[in-house]
Image (cartoon, rainbow, N blue to C red):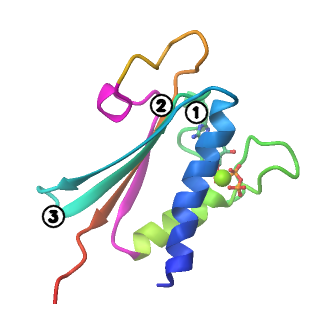
């Protein structure tokens, strides 16, 4: 799979987080080895407005967007979902993010929303 294609996954997650936080939010990117699943976990967490409970099950569907016309096509996460599945991985969302994904006293503070985290699990690349 082209690197350019994989790059879109991270660009979309970062753009979504940037759209969500507004002027003064925080985006927290973390990666760690997941020994149990023999893979790596990369998470993108933000202190933005969060995802409405009723939308949590829909955001990976093609054309689902809450953005204004012309601002979002609603394809970013559905395309990313496909790319990550093709790589044998998984993507999930939690809103608000558990503390381990957004350390510090950001959530619930005056200037920020509940926040969101996208967790991407990828299999460890095979060594030759
Ligand atoms: N970090 C986030 N915080 C809050 N809501 C989010 C976040 N990421 C995604 N969403 C919600 O999920 C929807 C779908 O995201 P997706 O990336 O698929 O499409 P989009 O950003 O609306 O448009 P596109 O990515 O095609 O420009 C968004 O419109 C938004 O409602
Ligand atoms: Mg997007």
Which residue bears the numbered disc 3? 38
Is label 1 within 8 A of ligand 1 (CB to nearest ligand atom)? Answer: yes
In space, the residues marked 3 and 1 are separated at their CA atoms by 30 Å
Q: Which residue is situated farthest in the front direction here?
A: 24
Secondary structure at numbered mark 2: loop
Tag 3 or tag 2, which sits nearer the N-term? Answer: 3
Which residue bears the numbered disc 1? 51
Please give the range of residues in magenta.
87-103
Q: Which residue is situated farthest in the top direction here?
A: 110
Residue found 52% across the figure and 59% down from its top: 10
x then y, percent, for residue 81: 50, 63
Secondary structure at numbered mark 1: loop
Label for residue 96? none
In space, the residues marked 2 and 1 are separated at their CA atoms by 6 Å
Q: Relative to residue 43, is residue 38 drawn left or right?
A: left
Which residue bears the numbered disc 2? 95
Instruction: Specify whether residue 124 is painted magenta.
Output: no
Tag 1 or tag 2, which sits nearer the N-term? Answer: 1
Q: Relative to residue 38, is residue 72 drawn left or right?
A: right
């Amino acid at each position: 799979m082209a690197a350019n294609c994989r790059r879109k996954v991270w660009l979309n997650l970062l753009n979504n987080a940037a759209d969500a936080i507004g002027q003064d939010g925080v985006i927290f990117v973390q990666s760690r080895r997941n020994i149990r699943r023999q893979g790596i976990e990369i998470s993108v967490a933000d202190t933005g407005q969060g995802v409405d409970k009723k939308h949590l099950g829909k955001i990976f569907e093609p054309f689902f967007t809450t953005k204004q016309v012309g601002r979002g096509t609603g394809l970013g996460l559905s395309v990313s979902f496909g790319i990550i599945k093709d790589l044998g991985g998984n993507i999930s969302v939690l809103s608000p993010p558990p503390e381990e994904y957004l350390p510090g006293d950001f959530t619930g503070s005056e200037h920020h929303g509940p926040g969101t985290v996208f967790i991407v699990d990828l299999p460890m690349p095979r060594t030759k």
